[in-house]
């Protein structure tokens, strides 16, 4: 009787999602209520799951490079080009942002997520009218399974959220982090440009640092980490992501068909290439799938990311004309950033479908 039972199942899921949303307290609220089993809306299909007991990198060493930005510029450019082409991910140290600012940011974003229920729920909403919102699972209503994390989200540019809309506990830290992380990202975009053999301010000219969104994720303890995931495998859509993670761990990157850990390094920042940079670089840099496993530890995991995107929505993006030639033809079509974002929002957070969509090789 599948024709009858399937609509009933779909209806139940819809209702459970709605009830969860209406608590306005996210996954943290479920844990605070003392649950020992996770609701079925969080159950992921087998292929998404991580065997946390057995998830250490089998390569023995963690291959994601840690790049010292205080080294000679040419060397740094080479190291970044190599890391971004091979792994799509690297960490940076001596990046110029004070470690005490980073520690303060982690601490205060954690404090936001641990505010008393009645304080926290005031921020819970999905619209971005004030430039600040708080929710569990950006794709809660479209994904097949929810993930074990909550998020505080802020618009940083072109127009930043009004300061008084930003939760007071982490306001100063976020304002300072936005300034410092943007400076760092602009420097890195210069290195990414030089690594492609184009002028240093090429990506900046394309407005690549000017559309910025910040997320402050909270991954609470999960009582059944082998049934769900912290963030499902995905690639980031934009130019690049600057991510600060605390010492708990859980971020994994796909390399050579295997998942490898991005080990926490105190004071370091994780940098990764997004789909748009992969396409602009004509595959010189790779946007790589990554995920976070559901946190099996009693200590919550905090990560704070800024996504750097272009701000000019009508402009066309695609492989830079300077780097394509008869020998190295363009692998992607050109598209406006508007069209790109439309494609992004019409899919779930999974897989590499966005770069595939614009690929010229898949069109026949
Ligand atoms: C993301 C992401 C990783 C993390 O927000 O896109 O990949 O460590 N986050 O939280
Ligand atoms: Ni990501």
Image: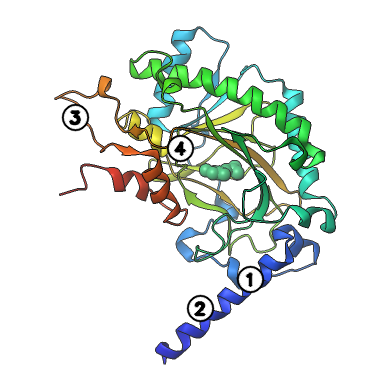
Determine the CA span between mark 2 and mark 4: 33 Å
Determine the CA span between mark 2 and mark 3: 46 Å
Determine the CA span between mark 3 and mark 1: 48 Å
For residue 195, which quarter of the picture?
Answer: top left
Determine the CA span between mark 2 and mark 1: 12 Å
Foreground: 128 or 302? 128
Dot 3 surroundings within 10 Å: few (below 14), some, or many (20 or more)? Answer: few
> Disc 1 designates what residue?
18
**What's the mark number on residue 238?**
4
Q: Position of residue 250 (x, y in %)?
A: 61, 45
> Disc 3 designates what residue?
329
Query: Please, which colouring scheme is shown?
Result: rainbow
> Disc 2 designates what residue?
10
Q: Secondary structure at mark 3?
A: loop
* Labels 2 and 4: the sequence-earlier one: 2
Horizontal relation, residue 10 to residue 37: left or right = left
**What's the mark number on residue 74?**
none
* Labels 2 and 1: the sequence-earlier one: 2
Tell me which image quadrant ligand 1 sits in. top right
Disc 3 vs disc 1: which is toward the camera? 1
Dot 2 surroundings within 10 Å: few (below 14), some, or many (20 or more)? Answer: few
Residue positioned 22% across, 42% down in the render: 360
Dot 4 surroundings within 10 Å: few (below 14), some, or many (20 or more)? Answer: many
For residue 323, which quarter of the picture?
Answer: top left
Q: Would you say residue 256 is visible in this rendering?
A: yes
Q: Are marks 1 and 4 in contact (CB under 8 Å)?
A: no
Foreground: 262 or 274? 274
Dot 1 surroundings within 10 Å: few (below 14), some, or many (20 or more)? Answer: few
């Amino acid at each position: 009787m599948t024709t009858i039972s399937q609509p009933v199942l779909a209806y139940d899921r819809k209702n459970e999602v709605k009830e969860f949303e209406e608590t306005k307290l996210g996954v943290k609220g479920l844990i605070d209520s003392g649950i020992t089993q996770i609701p079925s809306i969080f159950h992921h299909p087998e292929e998404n799951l991580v065997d946390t007991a057995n998830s250490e990198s089998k390569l023995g060493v963690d291959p994601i490079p840690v790049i010292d930005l205080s080294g000679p510029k040419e060397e740094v450019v080479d190291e970044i080009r190599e890391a971004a082409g091979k792994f799509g991910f690297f960490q940076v140290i001596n990046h110029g942002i004070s470690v005490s600012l980073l520690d303060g940011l982690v601490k205060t974003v954690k404090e936001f997520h641990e505010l008393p229920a009645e304080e926290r729920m005031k921020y819970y909403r999905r619209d971005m009218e004030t430039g600040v919102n708080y929710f569990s699972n950006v794709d809660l209503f479209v994904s097949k399974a929810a993930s074990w994390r909550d998020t505080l989200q802020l618009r940083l540019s072109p127009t930043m959220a009004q300061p008084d809309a930003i939760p007071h506990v982490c306001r100063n830290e976020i304002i300072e982090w936005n300034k410092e992380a943007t400076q760092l990202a602009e420097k890195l975009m210069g290195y990414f440009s030089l690594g492609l053999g184009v002028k240093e301010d090429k990506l900046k000219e394309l407005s690549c640092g000017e559309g910025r969104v910040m997320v402050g994720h909270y991954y609470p303890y999960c009582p059944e980490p082998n049934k769900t995931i912290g963030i499902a495998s995905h690639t980031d859509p934009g130019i690049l992501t600057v991510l600060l993670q605390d010492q708990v761990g859980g971020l994994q990157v796909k390399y050579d068909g295997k998942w490898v850990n991005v080990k926490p390094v105190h004071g370091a920042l994780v940098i990764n290439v997004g789909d748009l940079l992969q396409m602009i670089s004509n595959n010189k840099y790779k946007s790589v799938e990554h995920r976070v496993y559901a946190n099996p530890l009693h200590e919550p995991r905090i990560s704070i990311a800024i996504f750097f995107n272009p701000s000019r929505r009508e402009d066309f993006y695609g492989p830079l004309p300077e780097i394509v030639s008869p020998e190295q033809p363009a692998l992607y079509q050109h598209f406006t950033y508007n069209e790109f974002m439309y494609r992004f929002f019409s899919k779930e957070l999974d897989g590499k479908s966005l770069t595939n969509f614009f690929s010229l090789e898949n069109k026949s």
